[in-house]
Image: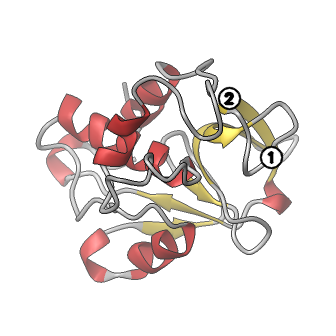
Amino acid sequence: MKNPREQIVIEARKYLGIREESKNRFTGISKLWDATSYPDGWRYREPYCAAFVCYMVYRARMAMPGVFGGQRCKSAKCSEWMKWARGKASGCMITRLPKAGDIVNYLPNRSHLGIVERYDAMKRVVHTIEGNTDDGGSGEGDGIYRMQRKLSFCGEFYRVPVLPAAGNP
């Protein structure tokens, strides 16, 4: 693996195909929320796209200790991810050209987050894995899906930092 951030994608792929049993609920959803600063979000059936992203970043960091730098975002709110990415402690690079393992924030078009699986520069299409979406691309869906989004629909991308010894593509 050339890009250690691809571990985030590897973790997200493990959850593809999960469907809600009822609104914003599926077996094991509380694990996602435990990776946030709002661990009871699942009890109140809150939208979980950001909790999904938090958990995938957490899992990647656990799978590759000592590789990722900066403070991990623990917010379950898309707007807070924006603030976190701009903060010095995050170590994030904010970009408009995505790479595998980047976090996509769809603000201002939609309050929703996802994980970049790959980017097709020729078609200008971002392939993502997203929680709390559906086949139609809703921001309040019924499971965890692969999506294809036009680059123009995406807000910005957050590239979590990798420590120099681990490589930093």
SS of the residue under disc 1 = loop
Amino acid type of disc 2?
A: Tyr
Quadrant in the picture for the N terminus? top left
Question: For mark 1, does the 10 Å Cα neighbourhood hold few (<14), some (14 to 19), or many (20 or more) residues?
Answer: few
The colouring scheme, among rainbow, by chain, secondary structure or one colour, is secondary structure
Q: Which residue is drawn at 64% across and 42% down?
A: 132
Q: Relative to 42, does residue 2 appear above or below in the rendering?
A: above
Q: Nearer the viewer, residue 131 or 63?
A: 131
Amino acid type of disc 1?
A: Ser
Q: Residue 145 — which label?
A: 2
Marks 1 and 2 in Cβ contact (< 8 Å) = no
Q: Nearer the viewer, residue 32 or 44?
A: 44
Between disc 1 and disc 2, whose residue precedes?
Answer: 1
What percent of the width, then of the height, locates residue 36?
A: 33, 55
Q: Residue 130 — which label?
A: none
Q: Residue 138 — which label?
A: 1
Q: Which of 3 and 14 is in front in this view?
A: 14
What percent of the width, then of the height, locates residue 147?
A: 75, 35
Q: Is residue 50 visible?
A: yes
Q: Relative to 159, does residue 14 appear above or below in the rendering?
A: above
Residue 16 occupies quadrant: top right
